[in-house]
Image (tube, helix red, strand yellow):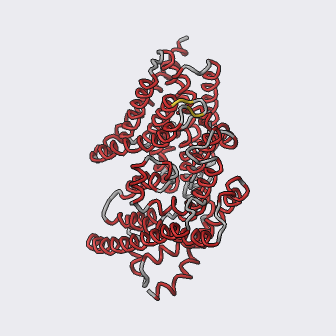
């Protein structure tokens, strides 16, 4: 553990260098996150005619632009990376290193965060310049919770993708699962439609799943949809609990998977 | 006159040659696909799931509103059905070949494609099929039928023909854009993410084009002409499209196809193989 911590600055630096080397490719990947913008175009023209269930145009602008920021800041491609490395056997190199492989993955994807931040900065400027600015929270308690929620969303997303990546130990076509996952995530996290606008039974289901903590909750806190700071703090606490739990699940899957994998290779 | 007949015969022979070639490539993909029979079932279930997924925003929206930008629920469903059909064809017949091509260019195996006695663009476009995507297309057709039942409207034979014709034109537009991006692979090897970008922009075509305004309309008209792909065919089926607009669509599709062919030829000239 201490070894991993000592190695972390170097691992992050390597990740940053890698991200810089492939910056053009990464930028295009970030640009493929068009769904919030498409939904924004749709809902703003709906809300311009008349507010949609107490959601005015500026609420939709704030929601989808902040969702775009959160999504791009907290995303990673570790599931694809792991799946590829497990399929080709490159993962053996990671197993030889003196730190847990998760530390290596963590370094790579933490290193990409500064670049992600630069890429979403223009979106942030648009938010501050648009009508959405009026609904953003400004009091210190909420701002602090937003920061915590962003870190939590990053950790939770990372843990979820570690789980999905570790599936490659057990399934041949694990990336097909990632598609299914995205389908569930998009609805249950509020990525497609803000959670309060979903039909009641979907909303009730989403409440029990971790996905809303990855996107919908942080966005809701940031755009003032959770005015009670105590309630917002509870949401953040739930989010961190989910992140911890899923990280443990990922570690367990990894241990089981590696045992299997070694048995395979002989 | 004799030479004209020979030329005609030869051209007929060439069309038949390419049709047979396409059939062979399709059969090869189907045989490969049949090895994973469970996939058909899984894929069928997934198609249903994605169909419901696509419908969700529509249901949420029309639960509250009778019309959006002049589009009723039934009419918007027609657009959605066209979107599902076009995407089914794209993911069944066009996109799977992409992975093959990127790999070929990187490894240099594309040289062998060029050596074959058939057009390279044709070979590249038909390299791989995902036959089970037919489930999506059938789902889209089912949705289309349901939309018209809901509207209580029977499109005339002419309207259906015009709609299908424009749908094909829409596919041609998407394919032309696809080929132009793929042609970039000869200059920059990694362009698969650009294809994903095109696909993610195309996702907006599930909505009637007139719903979008401002910057969105500019992008969806000039960068990726989404209206051409789903909205105009839907209007043709609903009988609200003028003949002039329909002809303009067809002309636009043909023009874009010609441009894409030109870009492909230019790009091919700058292909220098992986080894050199």
For the point 46% across and 88% down, the residue is A2
**Residue B127 horizontal/vertical position (percent):** 44, 42
Of residues B124 and A91, the one nearer the viewer is A91
Question: Would residue A169 appear left or right of A206 to someone viewing this image?
Answer: left
Question: Would residue B64 appear left or right of B128 to someone viewing this image?
Answer: right
The answer to which quarter of the image holds residue A87 is bottom left
**Which quadrant: the N terminus of chain B?**
top right
**Residue A241 horizontal/vertical position (percent):** 42, 72
Question: Would residue B230 appear left or right of B146 to someone viewing this image?
Answer: right
- List the single residue furthest toward the right: A129
Vertical relation: A246 (above or below) B258: below
Vertical relation: A257 (above or below) B275: below
**Residue B212 horizontal/vertical position (percent):** 63, 39
For the point 60% across and 25% down, the residue is B250
Q: How many marks?
A: 0
**Which quadrant: the C terminus of chain B?**
bottom right
**Residue B99 horizontal/vertical position (percent):** 47, 50
The answer to which quarter of the image holds residue A12 is bottom right
- List the single residue furthest toward the top: B1
Vertical relation: A202 (above or below) A11: above
Q: Is residue A49 visible?
A: yes
Q: Is residue A18 visible?
A: no
For the point 28% across and 71% down, the residue is A260
Of residues A173 and B235, the one nearer the viewer is B235
């Amino acid at each position: 553990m201490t070894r991993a911590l000592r190695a972390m600055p170097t691992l992050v630096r390597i990740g940053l260098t890698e991200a810089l080397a492939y910056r053009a490719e990464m930028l295009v990947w970030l640009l493929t996150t068009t769904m919030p913008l498409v939904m924004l175009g749709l809902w703003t023209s709906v809300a311009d005619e008349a507010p949609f269930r107490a959601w005015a145009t500026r609420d939709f602008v704030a929601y989808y632009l902040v969702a775009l920021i959160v999504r791009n800041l907290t995303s990673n491609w570790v599931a694809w990376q792991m799946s590829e490395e497990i399929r080709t056997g490159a993962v053996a190199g990671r197993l030889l290193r003196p730190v847990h492989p998760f530390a290596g993955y963590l370094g790579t994807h933490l290193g990409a965060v500064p670049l992600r931040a630069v890429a979403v900065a223009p979106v942030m400027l648009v938010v501050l310049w648009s009508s959405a600015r009026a609904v953003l929270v400004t009091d210190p308690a909420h701002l602090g919770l937003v920061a915590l929620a962003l870190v939590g969303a990053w950790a939770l997303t990372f843990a979820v993708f570690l789980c999905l990546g570790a599936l490659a130990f057990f399934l041949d076509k694990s990336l097909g699962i990632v598609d299914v996952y995205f389908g569930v995530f998009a609805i249950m996290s509020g990525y497609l439609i803000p959670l309060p606008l979903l039909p009641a039974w979907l909303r009730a289901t989403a409440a029990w799943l971790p996905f809303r903590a990855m996107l919908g909750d942080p966005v809701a806190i940031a755009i003032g949809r959770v005015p009670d700071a105590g309630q917002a703090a509870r949401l953040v606490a739930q989010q961190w609990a989910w992140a911890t739990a899923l990280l443990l699940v990922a570690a367990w899957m990894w241990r089981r998977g590696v045992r299997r994998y070694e048995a395979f290779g002989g | 006159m004799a030479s004209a007949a020979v030329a005609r015969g030869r051209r007929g022979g060439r069309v038949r040659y390419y049709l047979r070639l396409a059939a062979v490539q399709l059969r090869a993909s189907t045989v490969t696909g049949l090895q994973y029979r469970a996939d058909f079932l899984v894929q069928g279930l997934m198609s249903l799931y994605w169909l419901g997924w696509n419908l969700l925003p529509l249901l949420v929206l029309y639960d509250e509103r009778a019309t959006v930008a002049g589009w009723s629920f039934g009419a918007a469903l027609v657009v959605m059905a066209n979107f599902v059909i076009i995407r089914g064809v794209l993911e069944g017949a066009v996109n799977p070949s992409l992975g093959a091509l990127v790999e070929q260019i990187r490894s240099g195996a594309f040289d062998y494609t060029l050596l074959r006695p058939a057009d390279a663009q044709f070979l590249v476009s038909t390299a791989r099929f995902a036959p089970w995507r037919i489930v999506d297309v059938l789902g889209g057709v089912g949705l289309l039928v349901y939309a018209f039942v809901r509207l209580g409207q029977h499109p005339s034979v002419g309207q259906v023909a015009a709609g299908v014709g424009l749908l094909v034109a829409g596919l041609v537009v998407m394919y032309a854009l696809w080929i132009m991006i793929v042609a970039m692979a000869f200059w920059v090897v990694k362009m698969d993410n650009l294809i994903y970008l095109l696909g993610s922009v195309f996702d907006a075509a599930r909505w009637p084009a007139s719903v979008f305004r401002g910057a969105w309309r500019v992008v969806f008209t000039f960068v990726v002409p989404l209206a051409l792909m789903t909205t105009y065919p839907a209007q043709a089926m609903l009988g609200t499209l003028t003949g002039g607009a329909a002809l303009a669509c067809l002309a636009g599709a043909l023009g874009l196809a010609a441009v894409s062919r030109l870009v492909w030829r230019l790009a091919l000239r700058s292909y220098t193989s992986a080894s050199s």
